[in-house]
Image (cartoon, coloured by chain):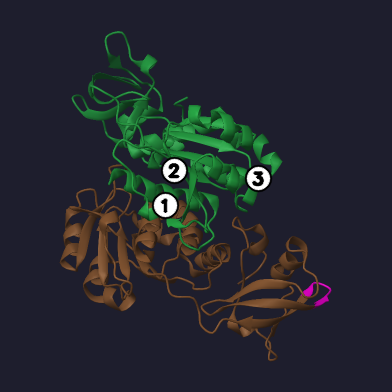
Chain colours: A brown, B green
């Protein structure tokens, strides 16, 4: 999964990620792919140099270059005792256009989202669900790119559900353990920024399709515990809205 | 300037924009370009139908379709007594990579920025300034696209200054009348979200290059009244950071 994309990616490499099963029996990590190239060419890696590493869904750590063997870099690793804390925001997102969705994966992972649930809505066009932006093979490298940029290791969990109503009525509590459920809507009586969150609480934010949720959908969400919150009067593209809203919520949750 | 891009654009048309000099002597507006197409094909415009209009850097208004003449749509217009209020946030941005800059124009206009000042920094690569993303002919249609999406009319003013120090030392107060100056930095002692803004105050936010401001640059900004504020520990791409930060500041300023 960590293939040549790493060199083509748009974000910076602020931490090199590996899968747990890439660790060797002696605890060393010895990439010879684009990650080794990055260490040698971008970081000008030399013997004894420290490199920030992270195990996907595991702890952050440091690798010390002990050997350079052609294109292969062998590092001795030490790891934090535990993975970083899980982001406190989950996202329920009505599927936007494929081009917008594709572009969202990396920034969502950068900003930090625990679980991303993609769903349908009346104003989502059906053929959006056929797009390759919704393939795990598409989103996984983009999410890893976002984590690599943000220096994080926790891969957002992704669920795709084509039917909103059974999702909201029956399944949502299994997919997201967030107690605070918010739906952004211009008619919301409370302002998003006034949301107060206890240190242990997690938030699930619902972001509607580009044409907005229908009244039926808003009611469905409200009966399942979503509070309406407003965020200004401007009409934003889904990707702009998601990043601005997650920026606000991450800061609120960290306060 | 309002050419076929309108049909290709990524955002939605939530308000059709026109330049003041496109109004005819009798006060009607009669487009026959992509805007007329949008009214006829997307809005299924018929006689008597109301269409949201806006004059660039002027008031919002409504056009009522009085005549359809082949590809031309003639509308009688009424306008708000005044333009919408100017956004309360200005942005001082160290130039990011051309691809990132190009992608930022429309969302910046959507979120609402009064003035955008693009500048240099030690960690900005020099050739970035040669890119077409910095041509007015590139940014103007993208900013208009963002306004069209956000249903706003106020075009951000854009200034490009290749030298940071004379900009900050001599010229900044002329380009931005914001009294509150903030620079986002992980070492900032105060948290951005705790910023308090009086209803009449405007904010100038400085966003550094992807590698960060140098200590010299931070000091330069601080001596000119910028306060350091922190926003989490994640390292974000410039475009993600801008949208998240502007989302937070817009909400703070509207509170």
Q: Report in which chain the residue with disc 1 lies.
A: A
Task: Write the start and end of the magenta stretch as one range.
Answer: A67-72
Quarter of the image for residue A27 reads bottom right
Q: Residue at x 58, y 66 (%)?
A: A148
Question: Which residue is label 1 attached to?
Answer: A239
| Circle 2 residues within 10 Å: few <14, some 14–19, many ≥20 | many
- For residue B207, side relative to residue A206 (left or right): right
Residue B214 visible, this orientation: no
Q: Is residue B68 left or right of residue A187?
A: right
Q: Which mark is residue B13?
A: none
Q: Is residue A71 magenta?
A: yes
Compared with residue B237, is residue B42 higher up or lower down, i.e. above or below? above
Q: Position of residue B117 (x, y in %)?
A: 52, 35
Residue with the mark numbered 3: B124
| Subunit under mark 3 | B
Contact check, label 2 and label 1, Cβ < 8 Å = yes
What chain does badge 2 belong to?
B
Image position, residue B215 (x, y; %): 63, 51
Mark 1 Cα shell of 10 Å, populated few (<14), some (14-19), many (≥20): many
Question: Label for residue B107?
Answer: 2
Q: Give the Cα distance between marks 2 and 1.
A: 9 Å
- Of tags 3 and 1, the one toward the viewer is 3
The secondary structure that most of the magenta stretch takes on is strand
* Quadrant in the picture for residue B74: top left
Residue A59 in picture, x, y percent from top left: 54, 79
Callout 3: few (<14), some (14-19), or many (20+) C-alpha neighbours within 10 Å? many
Q: Find the residue positioned furthest to the top.
A: B25
Q: Nearer the viewer, mark 3 or mark 2?
A: 3
- The residue at the point 23 percent across, 21 percent down is B81
Q: Vertically, is A51 above or below A250?
A: below
Q: Disc 3 vs disc 2: Cβ atoms closer than 8 Å?
A: no
Q: Nearer the viewer, residue A159 or A188?
A: A188
């Amino acid at each position: 999964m960590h293939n040549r994309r790493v060199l083509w990616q748009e974000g910076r490499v602020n931490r090199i990620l590996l899968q747990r099963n890439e660790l060797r029996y002696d605890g060393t990590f010895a990439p010879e792919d684009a990650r080794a190239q990055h260490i040698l060419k971008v970081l000008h890696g030399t013997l004894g140099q420290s490199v920030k590493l992270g195990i996907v869904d595991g702890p952050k750590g440091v690798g010390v270059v002990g050997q350079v063997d052609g294109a292969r870099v062998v590092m001795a690793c030490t790891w934090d005792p535990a993975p970083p804390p899980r982001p406190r925001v989950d996202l329920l997102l009505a599927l936007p256009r494929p081009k917008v969705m594709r572009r969202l994966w990396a920034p969502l992972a950068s900003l930090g989202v625990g679980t991303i649930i993609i769903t349908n809505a009346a104003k989502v066009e059906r053929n959006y669900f056929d797009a390759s932006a919704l393939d795990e093979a598409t989103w996984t490298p983009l999410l890893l790119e976002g984590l690599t940029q943000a220096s994080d290791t926790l891969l957002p969990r992704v669920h795709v559900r084509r039917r909103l109503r059974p999702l909201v009525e029956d399944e949502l509590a299994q997919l997201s353990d967030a107690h605070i459920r918010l739906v952004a809507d211009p008619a919301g009586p409370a302002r998003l920024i006034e949301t107060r969150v206890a240190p242990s609480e997690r938030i699930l934010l619902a972001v509607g399709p580009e044409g907005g949720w229908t009244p039926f959908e808003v009611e469905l969400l409200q009966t399942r515990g979503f509070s309406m919150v407003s965020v200004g009067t401007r009409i934003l593209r889904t990707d702009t809205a998601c990043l601005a809203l997650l920026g606000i919520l991450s800061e609120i949750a960290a306060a």
